[in-house]
Image: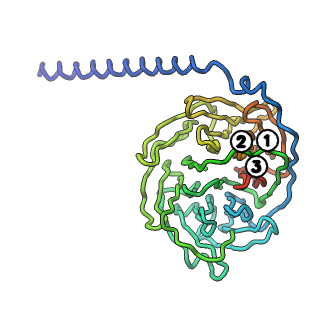
Amino acid sequence: MATEELRVDCDIDSIDALSREAETLKARLEQERSQLNDVDLSEVAQRLDPLPPFIMKARRILKGHQGKVLCVGWSTDKRHVVSSSQDGKLLVWDAFTTNKEHAVTMPTTWVMACAYGPSGTVVACGGLDNKCTVYPLSLDEDPATKKKLVGTHTSYLSCCKFTNSDQQKVSTNSDQQVRVCCRRSVPTQDQQKVSTNSDQQVRVCCRRSVPTQGQQILTGSGDSTCCLWDVESGHMMQCFHGHSCDKSIMVWDMRSGSCVQVFDGHESDVNSVKFYPSGDAIATASDDATCRLFDRRADREVGCYKKESIIFGCNAVDLSLSGRLLFGGYNDYVVHIWDVLKGNRVAMLYSHENRVSCLGISPDGTPLCTGAGTTP
């Protein structure tokens, strides 16, 4: 008995010693990181010329949903937009003519997520049915007759995104209106790198159906998981566990399923995340009325975009193709546009009569699609 008690005491002492060593190492890492944090991004960019003036106007208003629009997404043809709504409808629009080209009635209301496939011939969506379903788009037959169930969560589907969908944008919305704005005189020299986003939030016309072999889709859910699915087989290839309401941003390795980086800094819930075009940084939007930029190489926050006059939360974020402009959709009904390098606000868009809950830049970087709603 005495031997067992001694062994237990030794184990407790070993655990305490390891815990102290771990805390010491964490403190040393934080100290090393703080030594490298010697200058802000805005200070480095002071020598750069300011951006030239540019004008953005509302060019089209797409009306047709009978409930709150919850998600919108651009096609890779840069012309068509898909939207999903609280009314249980999935609509495909021609953004040039504002005509609806497809309408799919879902088996549930609150269709919270939708996304285009990389070919522009399929769309994926889901919501309170806990499922991610892919619909091939064809003018010759109803897309619902060829639908394919890809994956099922234990709670509602909050976002979905094709991983090999280059320059695809997914966002959420809630007001029955989608607006398309065009931007002029903004440089977009840099090419956008394909990157994926696995946070729980993450927003066509086709003449024939095409096979979906080889495609993969990421889904986020209210069950605190993100999952990677094979579209053809419906097999879950990877599941990412660890999300919670902790105001943090997590970066995952899609091959191993492990979390490789965690960023903290926001003081309230994070509503939207977007990879920088180069893939080396992440832009975020939060209820704390700020947008932030986190550099993956420096492993820290490098930019915070805020003003004292802005007291409302930011629901959606996106970046221009060059990475110089950051677009934030806020609860004050305004889209605020920030200079990523200098950190100052360069423009404001007043088109909506309610809070802006989603936005996304077209693959060619010219039009911006925004959505707004009466509730988050």
Question: For residue 374, which numbered disc appears in the image?
Answer: none
Residue sitting farthest toward the bottom: 140
Where disc 2 sits, the SS reads strand
Judged by depth in the image, the label closer to the viewer, 1 or 2, is 1
Q: Nearer the viewer, residue 16 or 199?
A: 199
- The image position of residue 309, as x and y in percent, is 82, 32
Q: Which sits earlier in the primary sequence, circle 1 or circle 2?
A: 2
Instruction: Determine the CA span between mark 1 and mark 2.
Output: 9 Å
From what the image shows, is residue 303 above or below residue 71? above
Q: Are marks 1 and 2 in contact (CB under 8 Å)?
A: yes
Looking at the image, residue 147 sits to the left or right of residue 5; the answer is right
Q: Amino acid at mark 3?
A: Val
Q: Amino acid at mark 2?
A: Cys
Estimate how packed mark 3 is, as few (under 14), some (14 to 19) or many (20 or more) residues with alpha carbons within 10 Å: many
- The image position of residue 21, as x and y in percent, is 37, 18
Estimate how packed mark 1 is, as few (under 14), some (14 to 19) or many (20 or more) residues with alpha carbons within 10 Å: many
Q: Nearer the viewer, residue 58 or 321?
A: 321
Estimate how packed mark 2 is, as few (under 14), some (14 to 19) or many (20 or more) residues with alpha carbons within 10 Å: many
Where disc 1 sits, the SS reads strand
**Residue at the (87%, 44%) spot, across then down:** 54
**Residue at the (37%, 18%) spot, across then down:** 20
Q: Amino acid at mark 1?
A: His
Q: Nearer the viewer, residue 93 or 164?
A: 164
From what the image shows, is residue 91 above or below residue 310? below
Quadrant containing the N terminus is top left
Reading the image, the residue beneath label 2 is: 314
- The image position of residue 75, as x and y in percent, is 68, 62
Reading the image, the residue beneath label 1 is: 336
Residue 271 visible in rendering: no
Reading the image, the residue beneath label 3 is: 356
Looking at the image, residue 272 sits to the left or right of residue 368; the answer is left
